[in-house]
Image (tube, rainbow, N blue to C red):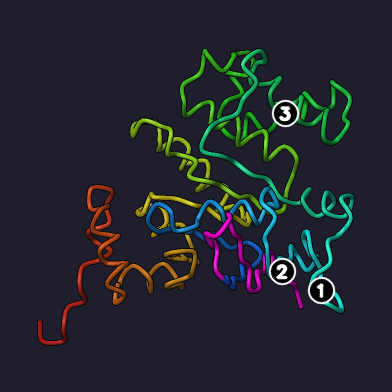
């Protein structure tokens, strides 16, 4: 049987006395798109960063395709794995952040190819060939020679996506990838992500784009105060908002097409 792409068991994360993530259990299957939604401060981004081991979780276990990430079960609790083993598992994960984090002194091609040279130790010709292929995949082959200052925000984010994809991860994590973009530029980034979903890429996405989540995600997770308050398929979560907190949350996104998602079901006699 194929192992889940991601499995979280009892994951907790503390910042001092504040528990940001409180005993989260979550399974994401290979090829699945899972969207994490919830109010600000609910722990969405922290949970995503734990999945990439950018934050060390304080309790619980995380597995990536069956391999423990960071910690493994031990006789007296958890044991921390060697850094080399952590790095090996993390190589199967790509991440895209709210901010683009591009090198301003390198072109789009340079931003993607330098990551390949640094991480995979590819020689420049091979790195640039692969970088061009992934820039073409996100629709930016004709902007390969442009610097970040010459690109729109949406184009910069697409370069960041190409940079992550070029490392050929099995899982992509997105932390509110459109939150820094003007509304008119959001669509081009979401379009790339829809294409990845259609290609079967496993993705976990922290997003406030409710319409996107409703139409692309197979798995929607609503977080509140560091816990999973509700999860299920997009149709189950959005079309039956029996959870009052979820209904109130969705009402704030009516302008993004959520009104059709939270409308009450008609009775048989309607």
**SS under mark 3:** helix
Q: Which comes sooner in the sequence, label 2 or label 3?
A: 2
State the image coordinates of residue 235 (x, y, percent, origin top left). 38, 70
**SS under mark 1:** strand
Asked if the residue at tag 2 contacts the one at tag 1, i.e. Cβ–Cβ closer than 8 Å, the answer is yes
| Residue 232: mark | none
Separation (CA) of disc 2 from disc 3: 34 Å
State the image coordinates of residue 270 (x, y, percent, origin top left). 10, 81
The single residue placed furthest to the left in the displayed view is 270
Q: Which comes sooner in the sequence, label 1 or label 2?
A: 2
Q: Which residue position holds label 1?
A: 73
User: Disc 1 or disc 3, which is closer to the eye?
Assistant: 1
Separation (CA) of disc 1 from disc 3: 39 Å
Judge whether residue 6 is colored magenta: yes
Residue occupying image coordinates x 64% and y 29%: 135
Asked if the residue at tag 3 contacts the one at tag 1, i.e. Cβ–Cβ closer than 8 Å, the answer is no
Q: Which residue position holds label 2?
A: 61
Separation (CA) of disc 1 from disc 2: 8 Å
Q: Residues in magenta?
A: 1-22
Residue occupying image coordinates x 21% and y 68%: 263
Closest to the observer, 14 or 101: 14
Magenta residues, dominant SS class? strand
**In this picture, residue 207 sits left or right of residue 156:** left
Q: Which residue position holds label 3?
A: 131
**In this picture, residue 30 sits left or right of residue 269:** right
Closest to the observer, 147 or 42: 42
| Disc 2 packing (10 Å; few <14; some 14–19; many ≥20) | many
């Amino acid at each position: 049987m194929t192992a889940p792409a991601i499995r979280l068991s009892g994951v907790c994360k503390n910042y001092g006395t504040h528990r940001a993530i409180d005993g989260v259990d979550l399974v994401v299957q290979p090829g699945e798109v899972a969207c994490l939604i919830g109010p600000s401060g609910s722990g969405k981004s922290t949970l995503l960063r734990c999945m990439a081991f950018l934050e060390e979780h304080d309790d619980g276990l995380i597995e990536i395709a069956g391999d423990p990430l960071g910690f493994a079960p031990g006789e007296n609790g958890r044991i921390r794995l060697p850094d080399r083993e952590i790095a090996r598992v993390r190589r199967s994960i790509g991440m895209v952040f709210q901010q683009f984090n591009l090198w301003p002194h390198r072109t789009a091609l340079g931003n993607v190819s330098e990551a390949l040279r640094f991480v995979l130790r590819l020689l420049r010709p091979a790195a640039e060939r692969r970088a061009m292929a992934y820039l073409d995949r996100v629709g930016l082959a004709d902007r390969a020679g442009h610097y970040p200052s010459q690109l729109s925000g949406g184009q910069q984010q697409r370069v960041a996506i190409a940079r992550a994809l070029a490392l050929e991860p099995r899982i992509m994590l997105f932390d509110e990838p459109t939150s820094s973009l003007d509304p008119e530029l959001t669509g081009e980034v979401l379009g790339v992500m829809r294409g990845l979903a259609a290609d079967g890429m496993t993705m976990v996405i922290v997003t406030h784009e409710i319409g996107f989540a409703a139409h692309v995600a197979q798995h929607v997770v609503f977080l509140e105060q560091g816990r999973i308050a509700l999860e299920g398929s997009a149709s189950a979560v959005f079309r039956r908002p029996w959870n009052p907190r979820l209904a109130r949350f969705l009402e704030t996104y009516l302008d993004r097409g959520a009104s059709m998602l939270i409308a009450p079901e008609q009775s048989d006699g309607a």
